[in-house]
Amino acid sequence: MTLQFSLSQQSPETNTAPCIVVGVFEERMLSSAAARIDEKSGGAIKRLIETGDISGKPGTTHLLFALPNVAAPRVLVVGLGEQKKFDAARFQRACTEMARALKGLPLESATTYLTEVDVPGRDGAWKVRSAALSADAQAYKYTATFKPREKSKSPEFAALAFAAAETANGALSQAAAIADGVRFARELGNLPPNICNPAYIAEQAQKIAKDHPGVSCEILEEADMRKLGMGALLGVSQGSAFPPQLIVLQWRGAGENDKPYAFVGKGITFDTGGISIKPSAGMEEMKFDMCGGAGMLGAFLAAVKLQLKLNLVCVVPAVENMPGGKAQRPSDVVTTMSGQTVEVLNTDAEGRLILCDALTFVQKYNPQVIIDAATLTGACVVALGKHATGLMSKDDALANELLAAGENSLDRAWRLPLWDDYQSQLDTGYADIANIGGKYAGAITAGCFLARFTEGYRWAHLDIAGTAWEEGRKGSATGRPVPMLVQYLLDRAG
């Protein structure tokens, strides 16, 4: 269930919502809403600051009940940290902790006054949108494969109002569309691979087209791909009982002659590594190897819901990578759709093999920009950890546009070099190119591999191996890079 968002112009002390949210900085600094609540309640907040119960440290929350002269029965006080260090990232954290606390309370709705707190360099619309997305991310709950449970008799958190002017209504519309895209991507990523196989993803894409006028969907089957010469993609799929699907979605929000933006997403619905099989420990997380494809579909869905005035094509090669009697072997040589041959030195470097054919295929639409997203390399996680997406592009302007979109949406990326110096690591004596570049700079050589299939186009590669999901048995898909990509499109659409 997606949270319902609205705006509120009520003063904090007269707001009758089941709970209102105010912020407190460290060093006994109160936000304006907190100061009004404190004044009306006879200093209730300051007394708790004096006793140390409320510290104002970032990430802390404190719930107050039935304050005198305050209409709301509950007041949630959220720590904002040091005022001089307060910035966009700290604002997002405060909103996240707010939502985490609210969803654990027996209430259906709340009003937050955190959107009145000044965030350097950000306007009211940005604060509303960011707060809404942070709250919706916390409200998301995966239930698809649990036994159906009786509906709880306790109220469930379902609606959040933001203290902001009516001019922020557009931000609420954006937040709702992006939240839908993020939830779509997270749900696909979280589903188990016995449900979310290539055909299932294709069905979800067809549903997007059915439900949204202006969207068309085409699904290419194995025979279609064979006719097109997609030897690299088919080589990966040949070990699986599930046939591959090449999903093509188009949105026409601009003129017929306007070149589209192109999104390409890696859709490996489960990755055993193939014959180069992965260690068993942690292999269950390889259901997330289709998060690049899920993220591109989620971003596409958000763009359609926003009715962006641009043309967009989204291509997702959906494949399962399995060992078996028909699986490709290390040292096999495959011929890509571009005509270039590839020696497969490691069958676990399969994402680039399905992407290279998809990147060649999408060029038939004469796109003005191509962006791909993939959980491509463990090397990117080693380099950047779980916080930043790896960004590679030879186009400085495109790279800077994506970096700016990431900073705006707080779905951030860090640029890695894509110099030709690394290309020699892909040399082999048996084909035009090898599918791995050796021990060093694994994320970069993967990008260099893809670069050979995008020459002449404005292209960027997003390695989301570290950012697409949270690790652990209860780890969940994050929906990244949907916020970054939608912001990029919003910037292009004006």
Image (cartoon, rainbow, N blue to C red):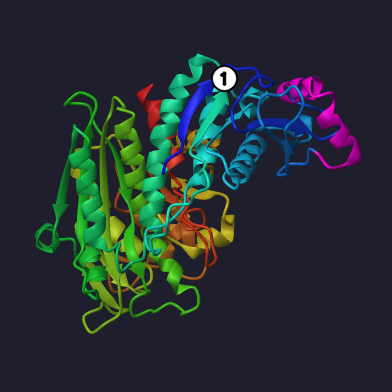
**Residue pictured at 46% horizontal, 70% vertical:** 438
Q: Main secondary structure of the magenta part?
A: helix
Nearest the viewer among 440 and 116 is 116
The picture places residue 167, in percent across and down from the top left corner, at 49, 15
The picture places residue 455, in percent across and down from the top left corner, at 30, 46
**Residue pictured at 65% horizontal, 28% vertical:** 72
Q: Does the magenta-highlighted stretch encompass residue 47? A: yes
Under circle 1, the secondary element is loop
Image quadrant for the N terminus? top left
Image quadrant for the C terminus? top left
> Which amino acid type is marked by label 1?
Ala
Residue 483 appears anywhere in the view:
yes
Where are the magenta residues, as a range?
32-55
Nearest the viewer among 310 and 131 is 131
Nearest the viewer among 257 and 420 is 257
Residue 416 appears anywhere in the view:
no
The picture places residue 373, in percent across and down from the top left corner, at 39, 50
Q: Does the magenta-highlighted stretch encompass residue 193? A: no
The picture places residue 295, in percent across and down from the top left corner, at 38, 48
Q: Which of the 4 quarters of the picture holds residue 395? A: top left
